[in-house]
Amino acid sequence: MIITPNTEQLLLAAAYNNAVWCDAICRDGGFTGQAWISPRPTPLYYPDAVTLTRDTDAAALIAGIDTAAPRASVKDSFAVLDLAPAGFEVLFDAQWIHRPAGAPGATPALEWSRITAAAELEAWETAWDGEESTGLFHPGLLPAAGEDAAEPGDAGDIALLAGRDAEGRILAGAAANRTGEVVGISNVFSADGTPDDEAWTGALTLTAALWPGLPAVGYESGDDLAVALRHGFTAIGPLRIWVHSG
């Protein structure tokens, strides 16, 4: 893949956007010029560090996290680090993705809206998990009091998106967060029997309404990457997840 200056800017924006999302979930990290780092163990599925530049100092990065904690991990946003000498192994590779601004051509089959209350949040996380609400997605992710989520361009920086059937059951969803001039889309899910395409169509439609004119970024791998590409995303560069083997 040829990385152009414009692609590099998108990669930097996508990595930073994802690090901000990790920070919002974990609530215990901090930013340096080269990375986001959490000195304490992070929740399941979340890295202990996210690199923000290609020249991140690997030794300083590792020194900032608790490698004694089970499954300590690093998101190498540019797939350029060699962390094997420090006791890490590759967990998986993925691709950063980018989609130009605009709603998809298809119309969602479900009724899509933003999660705004704690009771809705519990139902949303239960649908995301497939079994129960674990508390990973905390109330701090919900709109602030008085925030008008219905006004385009005034949606704040984070939105949890839900697609409901006629009975009000959440059958699909996603998380979205805005940083600068991009919106990150992650945690895309659909319940058994609900097509993956519905989740992406609904999430992109609602995201375009909440933050009009902003492109979408994120990362995916495997079958999930194939679905994202089908919905107008382009793969723009690799990333790598390292996990400590100790």
Image: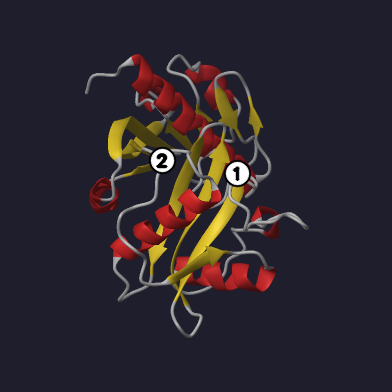
Task: State the scheme by which the image is colored.
Answer: secondary structure
Amino acid type, mark 1: Pro
From the image, tell me which residue sits under label 2: 101
Dot placed on the residue nearer the N-terminal end, 1 or 2:
1
Could you say where residue 78 lies in the image, as x and y percent from the top left?
Answer: 38, 25
Label 1: which secondary element: loop
Q: Is residue 229 above or below residue 56?
A: below
Q: Dot 1 surroundings within 10 Å: few (below 14), some, or many (20 or more)?
A: many
Where disc 2 sits, the SS reads loop
Residue drawn at x 50%, y 52% as measured from the top left: 209
User: On the image, which quarter does residue 27 sit in?
Assistant: top right
The quarter of the image holding the C terminus is: top left
Identify the residue position indicated by label 1 in the image. Answer: 41
Is residue 68 something that shows in the picture?
Answer: no
Which x, y percent locates residue 161?
51, 60
The residue that appears at 64% across and 40% down in the rendered structure is: 40
| Nearer to us: label 1 or label 2 | 2
Q: Position of residue 49 (x, y in %)?
A: 53, 33
Whether residue 54 is visible, yes or no, is: yes
